[in-house]
Amino acid sequence: MRAIKYMKVDYMLTKKQMLILPLMVLVSVMLVGTSRDIGVMMGCSYMIFVGTIFTTAPFGSCHIKNTGFLLMLPATVADRVVGRFLYGLSFIAMVALLCAAGMGVSCLFGFEITATMMGLFLSNLALGVVIVALEYLLSYMLGEGKDNWQYVGNLVRVAPGMAMYFLFMFILGKADRETYVADRMAFLAQKTLYAGVLVLAVSLLIMAASAVICVKVIKRRDYV
Amino acid sequence: MELLEVKNLSKHYKAFDLRDISFTLPKGYIMGYVGPNGSGKTTTLNLITGILKCSDGEVYINGHTSKEDVRAYREQIGYVGDESYFPDNFTAKNIRKVLQDFYTTFSEEKFNSFLKKWNLPEKKQVKDFSRGMKVMLMFASVLSRDTKLLVLDEATNGLDPVMRTEILKLLQDYVMDGQRSVIFSTHILSDLEQIADYIYFIDKGRTILYDAKDEIIENFLLVKGESNAIPPALKRELIGLEENAYGFEALLRSDKAELLGNAFLVEKPNIDKIVIHFIKNRENENRI
């Protein structure tokens, strides 16, 4: 229960970024328009990339000196860490819902969402969840709000998500232009959706494992 | 009945050791925790609040440690530091929401009345508050719930005399019901003179003095006179001997008063003088 309260605190800490979220949605809508075949997936992939950046924002939102109030709240380390992971998951879930809504609207405009595309989307989402899980782990190991976060933090927040985005752009581009990849995807089409669901489930397990390790990391360090 | 009990508290760092800090603070009393910069005051207070983990020892509040039930332990503590400990982008409104969510004894009515009394804006971000406003907001956040122990770390530093006086009055009111206590670290020793019942003095992580304030004042004499008139037997007993062109000033334990004779001026020291001479004493020892 207190973990949910901590999640609410993280939304308070990062409320400013919610204001620029519509701008990111707009960019992804513009990406949809660039290609009839893979535009929807490009838009979704961009939103997942944005999600991986936004979900790590609470770590950089305040310096350790200004976190005493939050660290001293009557709660356990596990409450705090789980709250942060719930924030990350809920944000990714919100991104997934926005993507789903985007796909729905795209279908109304005549775009086709194939099983392969859905499988790719779920795999992209799963990779996003894994990236967030690893970023959280790294952030807790570095020490949230500490000065070293300032130097490494931006790289940690942006680089993995960006790499993921370009990887999916590459795969989608290949699927669009080179038929052999598309053929291979078509061959896998029936299985892709199931594989995507499975990969997503595995990614959530990785997220849970990361949360458990983060609690242990904090319990072993010098300060709460 | 003891409200706060600190037993053999130690914290080891590469360059600093806090060693074997032990004291008790009964309900209804105020303790001044004093020492020079870098003596270990903030470390001790952070160990009490549980922000830092101790290397050895235990802290009990109302007989319970944070290991037993961290939530109940923290519900009892109110902390006010020398700098704002709120996230910079929080407003008083955000803080109220968080307090409401986490603390079972939080009173919204009390919090709002403090905001009104101290003219603290609800929608302005904490980073735009003046230092005084930040301190008062911290006080509003701790006094609007039923804490048992107030931990103040240099909370009155840099405040104007009117605000400081108001805070000292607040602290006295806080312990008035005999159920709550305050541990208060400050450089402004005149504040302690006014409100502290106990003094704990540390330097370089070690205990120098710990007793009831009045006992400490009773136990020492402030001696002044001409340097060349100090007999060797007396010189050995003087604490923090400070000599200049006009003579000397030092502390002497009251039970050694018979060494004085009639050649010196003897006064009752205040806490400020006692602390200064003990620090001077350590400097003199280090020089030797």
Image: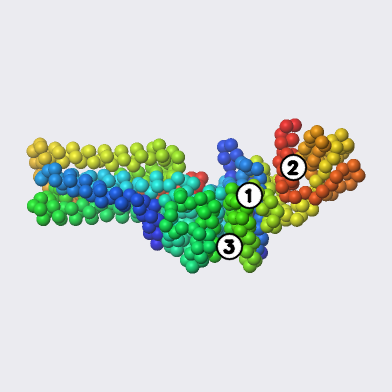
Residue bearing mark 1: B186
What's the residue type where badge 1 is placed?
Thr
Separation (CA) of disc 3 from disc 2:
34 Å
Residue bearing mark 3: B148
Q: Whole-percent x and y of residue A5?
A: 40, 59
| Location of the N terminus of chain B (image quadrant) | bottom right
Q: Closest to the observer: A73 or B247?
A: B247
Residue bearing mark 2: B277
Q: Residue at x 62, y 64 (%)?
A: B173
What's the residue type where badge 3 is placed?
Lys
- In this picture, residue B198 sits left or right of residue A17: right
Q: Whole-percent x and y of residue B229?
A: 88, 36
Q: Secondary structure at mark 2?
A: helix
Q: Whole-percent x and y of residue B58?
A: 60, 53
Q: Residues within 10 Å of mark 2 (few under 14, many from 20)?
A: many
| Residue B11, quarter of picture | top right
Q: Whole-percent x and y of residue A50?
A: 27, 46
Q: Residues within 10 Å of mark 1 (few under 14, many from 20)?
A: many
Nearer the observer, disc 3 or disc 2? 2
